Image (spheres, grey):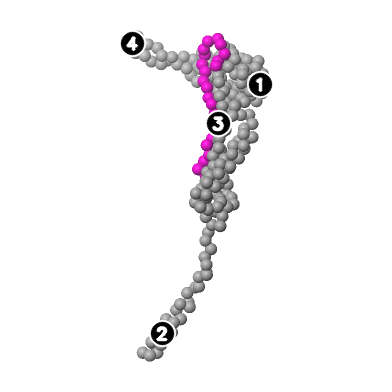
Amino acid sequence: MRAVAAGLLGLLLAGPALLPAGPASAEEAPGRISVVGRASREVAPDFATVEVAVESRGATPAAALDQNSTAARKVADLAGEFGIQGPDLATAAVSLRPASKTVREPGGQMRDVPDGYQATNAVSVRVRDLKRLGALMRRLLDGGADRIGGVAFGLADPGQTENAVRADAVRDARRQAETLAEAAGTRLGRLESLVSPPREGAPAPMHARAFAAKAGGVAVPVEPGTLTVEAAVEATYLVAP
């Protein structure tokens, strides 16, 4: 019994020495402040894209397509009168499908019957002289265009504006982080990370749109308005010790 008791006493005395010694002082991880900076600018567009379509009908597929091709070439020629050619004029879509019409049977019932074929040719026209946009649309409508699906305004070289707006977003993120640090009674440290666009996704630029159909003999009134260019960045700053 004395030998066992002596052994237990030895283990109890030696036990604490077997535990790993911890560091004298644990270094705390630095605090962080994460924000999303946003910015936007209103800018005037410098071009417009108009999609113009011509539709034709014929008794046979070839007749409908030939008639439609002639009308589409006329639209292209009219655009050329406004100095629009080359990459500013492109075919958007060509389609050919059976056509039908509704007739009344002797018994009074209505039904659809074949009525030849319908061909459609849609042309995308880029207009750089926005002052002539309304006159061009009027000319195309008078020259045989059946539809103008829409007018989309844009910037020929958006990179410079987008970069300036991104820089504004970075400055906005810095201001937010400084405000939060001051409110928390700390000082803002160095920038740790900067992500553009943020992981949540950045807002996309918005484009003004307009629509037109066949109307009177005057130029189609179209106002370009402005475009909103937006940017967002996600910034993380360390809190100064």
| Residue 22 in view, yes or no | yes
Marks 2 and 1, Cα distance to the nearest angstrom? 101 Å
Residue bearing mark 1:
85
Q: CA distance from mark 3 to mark 4?
A: 56 Å
Q: Secondary structure at mark 4?
A: loop
**Along the viewing direction, whichever of 7 and 94 lies nearer the viewer:** 7
Q: Which residue is mark 2?
A: 9
- Identify residue for label 4: 108
Eye-nearest disc, 2 or 1 = 2
Residue 216 drawn above or below residue 184? above
The image shows residue 55 at horizontal and vertical percentages of: 53, 16
Mark positioned earlier in the residue sequence (4 or 1): 1
Of the two numbered discs 4 and 1 in the rendering, the one whose residue sits closer to the viewer:
1
Looking at the image, tell me whether mark 2 or mark 1 is earlier in sequence order: 2
Q: Position of residue 189 (x, y in %)?
A: 57, 52
- Cβ atoms at labels 3 and 1 below 8 Å apart: no
Residue at image coords 52%, 18%: 212
- Which mark is on residue 228? 3
Disc 3 to disc 2, how far (Cα)?
Answer: 81 Å
Would you say residue 152 sits in the magenta stretch? no
Query: What kind of residue is marked 1?
Result: Gln
Q: Amino acid at mark 4?
A: Gly
Q: Residue at x 56, y 57 (%)?
A: 241
* Cα separation between marks 3 and 1: 28 Å
